[in-house]
Image: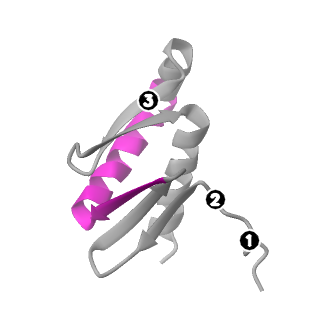
């Protein structure tokens, strides 16, 4: 029995089919292919390095992130960005 059965996380990544994924950020649903998912992971890692994160915190406290070949533009504050990073890391390192 899982402790998290009743909790709905605001950031979720789900596998739909072999190369199709669904990213849920708050109430927004974004379908991604595997290459788009890898590109998102790269962008999130790039924005959450120590230097870039410190610069973001000192300047504006948010990141505008284009997702899925620029079909979606997502406004992420620092906690949401870190939550997305954690979700992506857990998804890729769970195997």
Residue 21 located left or right of residue 89: left
Between discs 1 and 3, the one toward the N terminus: 1
Q: Which mark is residue 45?
A: none
Between discs 2 and 1, the one toward the N terminus: 1
Q: Position of residue 1 (x, y in %)?
A: 78, 86
| SS category of the residue bearing label 2 | loop
Between discs 3 and 2, the one toward the N terminus: 2
Q: Nearer the viewer, mark 3 or mark 2?
A: 2
Identity of the residue drawn at 51% across and 30% down: 50
| SS category of the residue bearing label 3 | strand
Marks 1/3 in contact by CB < 8 Å: the verdict is no
Identity of the residue drawn at 26% across and 51% down: 68
| SS category of the residue bearing label 1 | loop
State whether residue 20 is above or below residue 54: below
Span shown in magenta: 28-52
Q: Which residue is mark 3?
A: 63
Please say whether residue 1 is one of the residues in the magenta stretch.
no
The CA distance from mark 1 to mark 3 is 28 Å
Q: Position of residue 21 (x, y in %)?
A: 35, 69
Please say whether residue 33 is one of the residues in the magenta stretch.
yes
Q: Residues within 10 Å of mark 2 (few under 14, many from 20)?
A: few
State whether residue 29 is above or below residue 57: below
Residue 1 located left or right of residue 65: right
Q: Which residue is mark 1?
A: 4
Q: Which residue is mark 2?
A: 9
Q: Position of residue 49 (x, y in %)?
A: 47, 35
Marks 2/1 in contact by CB < 8 Å: the verdict is yes
Identity of the residue drawn at 48% across and 37% down: 48
Q: Residues within 10 Å of mark 3 (few under 14, many from 20)?
A: some
């Amino acid at each position: 029995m899982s402790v998290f059965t009743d909790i709905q996380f605001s950031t979720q990544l789900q596998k739909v089919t072999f190369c199709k994924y669904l990213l849920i950020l708050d109430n927004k649903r974004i379908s991604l292919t595997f290459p788009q998912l890898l590109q998102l992971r790269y962008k999130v890692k790039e924005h959450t390095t120590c230097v870039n994160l410190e610069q973001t915190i000192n300047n504006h406290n948010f990141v505008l992130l284009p997702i899925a070949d620029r079909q979606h533009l997502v406004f992420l504050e620092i906690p949401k960005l870190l939550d997305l990073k954690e979700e992506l890391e857990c998804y890729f390192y769970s195997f």
